[in-house]
Structures are given as structure tokens and as C-alpha cells.
Image (cartoon, rainbow, N blue to C red):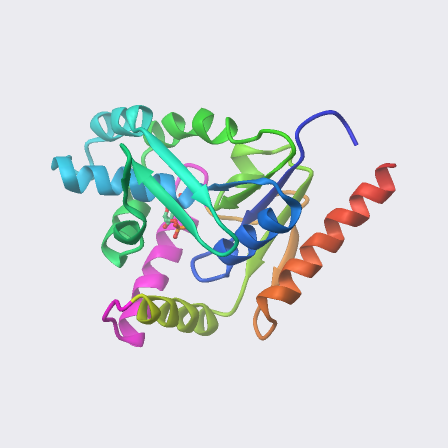
């Protein structure tokens, strides 16, 4: 393997399990984690806090460049701090998720976040979770995975996740919201959600997170062996 910092890029649509898998893989390897969706959600949160319109590209790009963010990672939980305040719960609402997907359409916002995201690649390695990790942010990633699951399974997972957090939602509403976000994320002009060149596609429908992590880990370990 080269002396570059190894990166495992995990992309996929909402509810594909990327977050859980990436966190758990980063923990298993003792690597850093980039939750790139959180950065887009943070921009959406700042927009709401400071009344910046979701089509004010320059205002949002400035917020993306200037925001002071810290992440902390435990075995199965990530905390996100904005200006020292814990905003983890706020970030997970459907309202900010929907706004994040709109903010993510703006090229200047994506450009402002690009270098911030690349800076996460620090030794001993990085697991990067998002929509364009393998295609745009880390095109030379050591391993690229496109994680997916059927729309029905993804909606159900998301619904259960929100319920667990005490957020009151209905399954049809979550399904509709996911379909709208999929459509926006896959069809935008800049860095659309797609299977990156060279990515391994993994359909997680009906398999446990532990099995998914084990599969990705074995792909990575296989690469490591073939390089040594
Ligand atoms: O992964 P997530 O649900 O936290 O992402 C929230 C939104 O951010 C998602 O709808 C699209 C956008 N996003 C993006 O455009 N590119 C990324 N690398 C990550 C997220």
C-alpha cells in the first residue's frame, strides 16, 4: 500500500445504513470518521438559526466555510458540536435533513465544504460517509463502497430510527420524504448521488449491520493482503 492515508468511502442513499456501518467500521479499525451529511445538515441548521434563505448561495457558502465544528465519536454514537454547543439531536430532525438536501444543491456550498472534508483524512485512516465520497471528495480512496437497500427497507429503518429518538412521524410520510430526497440527491447537477467508478455495490436488505461491516472489512483486508 502507498504512504497515503487510507480512505474507505461509503456512499449511498438515505436509510441505506451508511451512518451505522461507517461508525462501526471506523471504531473497529481505530480510524477517523467523516460524517459528511452532518456538514450539510449543519449549514441547514445555521440557515435556520440566522434566517439565511435556502437559495442564498453566497450566504450559505460563507456559513459553510466559517462554521466552527467538532465531532466526537464513541463506539455507537457520534456527537456534533457547533460553536461548542451540542447540536446532535437538532441535526437529526427531518426538517434539517430536507433543508440539507436543498443546501447540498448549491455548488458554492459544496466547494466550501470540499477542503474541509479532505482535511479529515488523517493517519491512521478515514472512513468517509456520504453521497459523493468516492466520486468527488476522495476519488483515489483505497476502497469505495456503494451501500443500498430497497426503498421499503430504507423507509422502515429511518422510521424506526426516528421513533427511537422520540420523534413523531408516520411511515408513509417518511417514505415520501425519502423518495423526494433520493430524487433531489440523484438528479442534482453537482456531485449527484451515484455509484462511483470502481465502487463495490452492497445491498444490505435483509442482512445485519454486523454482517455488512464484516463484508466491508474483509474487502479492505483483502486489498491490504494483495498489496503486501
Ligand atoms: O447523510 P445525511 O442524511 O445526513 O445527508 C443529508 C443531506 O446532505 C442529503 O440529503 C444530501 C446531502 N449530502 C450530500 O449532498 N453530499 C454528501 N456527501 C452528504 C450529504
- Report if residue 46 is visible in the image: yes
In percent of the image, x 29 and y 24: which residue is there?
66
* In the rendered image, the vertical position of residue 34 relative to residue 157, given as above or below: above
The chief SS type of the magenta part is: helix
In percent of the image, x 47 and y 73: which residue is there?
153
Instruction: From the viewer's side, name the closer residue of 187 and 26.
Output: 26
In percent of the image, x 51 and y 70: which residue is there?
150
Residue 132, given in percent of the width and then of the height, sits at 50, 41
Q: In which quarter of the image is residue 62?
A: top left
Residue 190, given in percent of the width and then of the height, sits at 41, 36
- Along the horizontal axis of the image, is 92 left or right of 207? left
* In the rendered image, the vertical position of residue 3 relative to residue 195, given as above or below: above
Residue 54, given in percent of the width and then of the height, sits at 20, 39
Instruction: From the viewer's side, name the closer residue of 115 and 72.
Output: 72
Quadrant showing the C terminus? top right
Q: Is 83 inside the magenta-drawn segment?
A: no
- Along the horizontal axis of the image, is 184 left or right of 47? right
Instruction: From the viewer's side, name the closer residue of 188 and 5.
Output: 5
Quadrant showing the N terminus? top right
| In the image, farthest residue toward the left | 51
Instruction: From the viewer's side, name the closer residue of 208 and 136.
Output: 208
Q: Give the range drawn in magenta.
A: 166-192
In percent of the image, x 52 and y 53: which residue is there?
75
Q: Quadrant of residue 58?
A: top left
- Along the horizontal axis of the image, is 137 left or right of 124? left
* In the rendered image, the vertical position of residue 74 relative to residue 174, given as above or below: above
- Report if residue 105 is visible in the image: no
Q: Is 187 inside the magenta-drawn segment?
A: yes
Residue 138, given in percent of the width and then of the height, sits at 58, 33
Amino acid at each position: 500500500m502507498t504512504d497515503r492515508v487510507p480512505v474507505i468511502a461509503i456512499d449511498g442513499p438515505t436509510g441505506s445504513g451508511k451512518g451505522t456501518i461507517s461508525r462501526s467500521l471506523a471504531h473497529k479499525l481505530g480510524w477517523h470518521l467523516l460524517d459528511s451529511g452532518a456538514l450539510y445538515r449543519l449549514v441547514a441548521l445555521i440557515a435556520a438559526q440566522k434566517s439565511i434563505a435556502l437559495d442564498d448561495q453566497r450566504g450559505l457558502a460563507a456559513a459553510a466555510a466559517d462554521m466552527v465544528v467538532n465531532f466526537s465519536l464513541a463506539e455507537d454514537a457520534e456527537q456534533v458540536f457547533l460553536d461548542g454547543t451540542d447540536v446532535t439531536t437538532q441535526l437529526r430532525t427531518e426538517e434539517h435533513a430536507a433543508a440539507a438536501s436543498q443546501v447540498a444543491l448549491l455548488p458554492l456550498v459544496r466547494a466550501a465544504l470540499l477542503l474541509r472534508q479532505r482535511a479529515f483524512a488523517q493517519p491512521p485512516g478515514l472512513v468517509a460517509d456520504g453521497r459523493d465520497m468516492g466520486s468527488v471528495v476522495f476519488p483515489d480512496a483505497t476502497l469505495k463502497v456503494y451501500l443500498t437497500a430497497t426503498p421499503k427497507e430504507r423507509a422502515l429503518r429511518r422510521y424506526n430510527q426516528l421513533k427511537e429518538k422520540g420523534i413523531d412521524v408516520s411511515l408513509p410520510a417518511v417514505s415520501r420524504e425519502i423518495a423526494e430526497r433520493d430524487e433531489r440527491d440523484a438528479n442534482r447537477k453537482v456531485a449527484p448521488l451515484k455509484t462511483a467508478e470502481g465502487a463495490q455495490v452492497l445491498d444490505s436488505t435483509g442482512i445485519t449491520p454486523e454482517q455488512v461491516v464484516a463484508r466491508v472489512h474483509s474487502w479492505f483486508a483483502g486489498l491490504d493482503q494483495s498489496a503486501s
